[in-house]
Amino acid sequence: MLGTTLSLAVALVLAAAAPQSPGKYLLLDARTVAHTENARLAVGTVEKDPRNPLFVEDQPWEVRFDNLYGNVLYDKEDGRYKIWYSPFIVDRSAKGMTLEKRARRYAPPKDREMGLCYATSRDGLTWEKPALGLARYKGSTENNIVLRGPHGTGIFKDLHEPDPKRRFKALFQGLAVRFSSDGLHWCPPSQCEGVSVAGDTHNNAFWAPTLGQYVGMTRTWGERGRQVARIESRDFVHWTEAKVVLEGLDKDQQTYAMPTFFYGGVYLGLVAIHEQSTDRVWTELAWSADTKEWHRVDAGTPLIPCAKEKLAYDYGCVYACAYPIFLEDEIRLYYGGSDWLHTSWRNGALCLARLRPDGFAGYEQATNAKPAMITTAPVPYNGQAIQVTTDVPEGGSLKVTILDADGNERSAARAITETVTDGALVLDRKLEENPIRLQFELDQAKLYSFTLAGRDG
């Protein structure tokens, strides 16, 4: 029988509340996990691309990338990666400055101005900045500026939208919105009715599939400094007043921005943490079932850390772009990196960090004294193949036991002794139970997810 766990009734409610995407369960979602022993949830390990930085401030109008505020997508219709990013096109540049020169105080000019720029790529690694002919800069439109003026712009392609003229949507400081058919030619701005916050951050919005409405993430201020605030809308014009959904653990580490997306039946947030004492920024991870109540994963531990070497391309700041790109063999996390401190003289760049599939966070042993045990809440089961995604180094193992809803053993799987992505379990007997629980025993392994994938046999 199962030991100290949630009651069966509560566990069933939690399991039913967890939306499927389809059949995938991320272990970072606490609704999926009923009981653990000697286990800790740890953020995944990113690998920064050796070709970083992917592009830098190499155009006359790219004076200072600052936080980049990048928005990335792979557009299947065009077969191209696209990014919208927001440099300051009127500012003071740090290009060529030594560390000694950066010791003097940085102050932005009074006529400081941000622009919205655009670049494309066939492979997501080599980027082109096309001459768009849309915005004038120093007498010429031979540049990749889409718009002059808007600050902190978040852009996404809305596949839920039936009107092609509103397929691309933008949310920016003000708060205000714009619509476009191609992401380049935008209608005049409209103020977000019902919202009063300034939104001086990387504002971003998305269609929340479990809520049937749009959700926007912006920023306000409180006793602990910067706070992530949430707004919602049915039509992307009329919005609810902003409500705080996440803030720092203290005033030193403040939540600057949080690009948010839906994956694996859960909402994930890439939280920019601005540490006041060091004036550096890194990216952490949070999750939510409903975009309203957020839970930080391994708070204080970066998902995308800053470099340790001074003046490295991302020593000072790491601001995650919206949104990750999910490929078959990896997750691409694009981000804006800065080589020096947030409020100082700094140069910026587009950078890339990679995660293994489902690798945002996973369970591992809290200590080496004994294996980690993770038991799930009951999940609906109709004979599907059961797959797991795990890292298992040489000498390690993952053992899986299938239990019924009451915790009685019904089947056991052949031990997994190597790293797999969506690796199918080989069971010693056929299952007929519904629902089931999965009990995982980890020895020097890290477990990220399991999937119920179609019908078995």
Image (cartoon, rainbow, N blue to C red):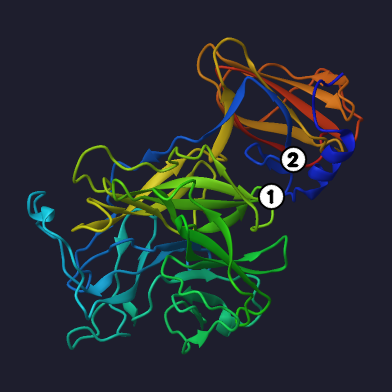
- Image location (x, y in percent) of residue 405: 88, 30
User: Residue 56's x, y, as percent?
Assistant: 24, 59
User: Which circle's residue, 2 or 1, is located before the other in the chain?
Assistant: 1
Residue 358: name its quadrant: top right
Q: Nearer the viewer, residue 340 or 89?
A: 340
Residue plotted at (55% across, 21% down): 392
Q: Amino acid at mark 1?
A: Gly
At x 26%, y 37%, the residue is 308
Vertically, is 378 above or below 238?
above
Q: Residues within 10 Å of mark 1 (few under 14, many from 20)?
A: many
> Mark 2 = which residue?
453
How far is the residue under mark 2 from the one under mark 1?
A: 14 Å
Q: Where is residue 83 shown, x and y percent of the image?
A: 40, 65
Counting from the top left corner in percent of width and height, residue 84 is at 39, 68
Vertical arrangement, residue 340 with respect to residue 298, above or below: below
Q: Which residue is mark 1?
A: 265
Q: Secondary structure at mark 1?
A: loop
Three-letter amino acid code at disc 2?
Ala
Element at badge 2?
A: strand
**From where the camera sits, is residue 121 visible?**
yes
